[in-house]
Image (cartoon, rainbow, N blue to C red):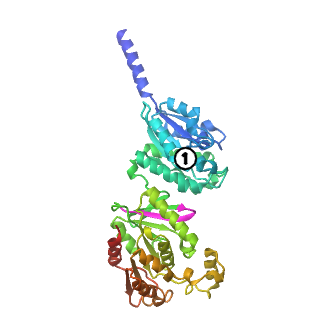
Amino acid sequence: MKKVLLFIFLAFICHTVTFAQIKVACIGNSITAGSGVKNRDKDSYPSVLGQMLGKDYLVRNYGISGRIIINKGDNPYLKEKTYQDALKFLPDIVIIKLGTNDSKPQNWKYKNDFKSDLEAMICDFQSLSSHPKIYLCTPAKAYGIQWGINDSIITEGIIPIIRQTAQEKSLPVIDIHTATDNMPDLFPDKIHPNPEGAIIIAETVYEGIKNEKPYHIMQAFPGIKSKWEGYDRYDFKFKNRNAIVVVPKKAAPGKPWIWRPAFFAAFPSVDIMLLAKGFHVVYYDLTHLYGSPHAIKLGTEFCDYMKDFYQLSSKVTVEGFSRGGFFAFNWAAQNSDRVTCLYVDAPLCDLFLWPGRDNKKLWNDVLKEWNLKDDQMTEDKGRSIYRLETLAKANIPIISVCGDSDEAVPFEHHMDLLRKHYLKLGGTVRVITKIGCGHHPHSLTDPTPVVDFILKYTK
């Protein structure tokens, strides 16, 4: 009889141990709660996640519609009873997917509180006796401005803060925003996923839990990850314009970077060599904005974004090919304290020569971008030579590569003219002339002279 009782006791213990489930708390807003799906208990993303994880996991949905991180906003999650319920659940895993509703104007005006309020939530969960593993999620893609929700704010304001917080707290990030990009049909009201969209989110969270990597080797930048010349490349949008970051194997001290405002990957020998030296190679597409004040503003905001959220150097090498050279001179003159040096290759230096008034279509494009009438496009706006005094006073070194037979942007009317004037102003400038070469090819077969120049002036 004693043996039978012992067997029953041991069987009970084994049963209890075997079925001690891993508790998962899904913290979130209406997308977590299941708005937009008819059967919340079956088709919300936490429900689907529970089905994927299986019987060893107990997944609970703590989503509440309209809730936000920011405590001063309209519906702060931290002040809800549901939040206290989630803490009392003593989860082993916490999935925090908030931020969508924080992008509304009435909430984002308190944006300076977003990081500290998110950190407060993290701290509450970290102090639990269950010592849960915490995952921060980027919000799902918003396909239109609905109820004040704004994907530009999500992309450019909220996601960088989430990533920065995760890095500082050594927490993994699950990138739902990228996972739900380019699938508007799965978001019927532009914000909430249908059941198929909820499956995408659940699959993304599932992969994050099951294939977790330490944060330092997870995706460092937003967007779609691929390879370029053997290096990690990230494609994303900033202010609805294309941006690319290519990451070195090991960043050089201070995280130096070179930035192209036009023609990514065209004749990239300098970029490739700088990657090997630890530079980040960055592209932000301002190609057809003709160095306008709008382009300068966008470029400055983008540089702030790279510096503030991804800790790239506060000073950058600006790389201007062809018309990108015109932008490089304009932007550097207005941001001289942020420039290490300029590398301009067959640079356009005079809008009156190209596209010129004779090319009516392109000239009208120039005037439109500059928001000017024809008689308002004066020489001080349309010619780079008028930027040189500012650059010389700031001691901005310039290196240029040009073909002496360039018919599109003749050397003698563009870079050679600027070189002579810059030298008279006491500026540092080196021009490498390619004999018998036209506008193309740009750059050098052996880019060492250009790279050495850039390295010399990169602190």
Q: Is residue 65 above or below residue 439?
A: above
Quadrant of residue 41 in the image?
Answer: top right
Residue 245 on the magenta segment: yes
Please identify the quadrant where the N terminus is shown: top left
Q: Is residue 329 above or below residue 42?
A: below
> Residue at left 32%, top 72%?
456
* 76 displayed left or right of 260: right
Residue 46 on the magenta segment: no
Quadrant of residue 274 in the image?
Answer: bottom left
Residue range corresponding to the magenta coloring: 237-248
Q: Which one is in front, 448 or 306?
A: 306
Q: Is residue 264 above or below residue 49?
A: below
Quadrant of residue 47 in the image?
Answer: top right
Residue 344 position in % (x across, y down) = 43, 78
Q: Which residue is mark 1?
A: 201
Instruction: Say if residue 159 shows up in the picture.
Output: yes
Q: Which one is in front, 385 or 87?
A: 385
Q: Is residue 416 above or below residue 368?
A: below
Amino acid at dot 1: Ile
* 392 displayed left or right of 241: left
> Residue at left 62%, top 86%?
357
> Residue at left 43%, top 34%?
127
Instruction: Say if residue 343 shows up in the picture.
Output: no
Q: Which one is in front, 21 or 83?
A: 83
Residue 97 position in % (x across, y down) = 53, 44
> Residue at left 57%, top 35%?
79
Q: Main secondary structure of the magenta part?
A: strand
Q: Which one is in front, 79 or 404?
A: 79
Mark 1 surroundings within 10 Å by alpha-carbon count, few (fewer than 14), some (14 through 19), many (20 or more): many
* 158 displayed left or right of 452: right
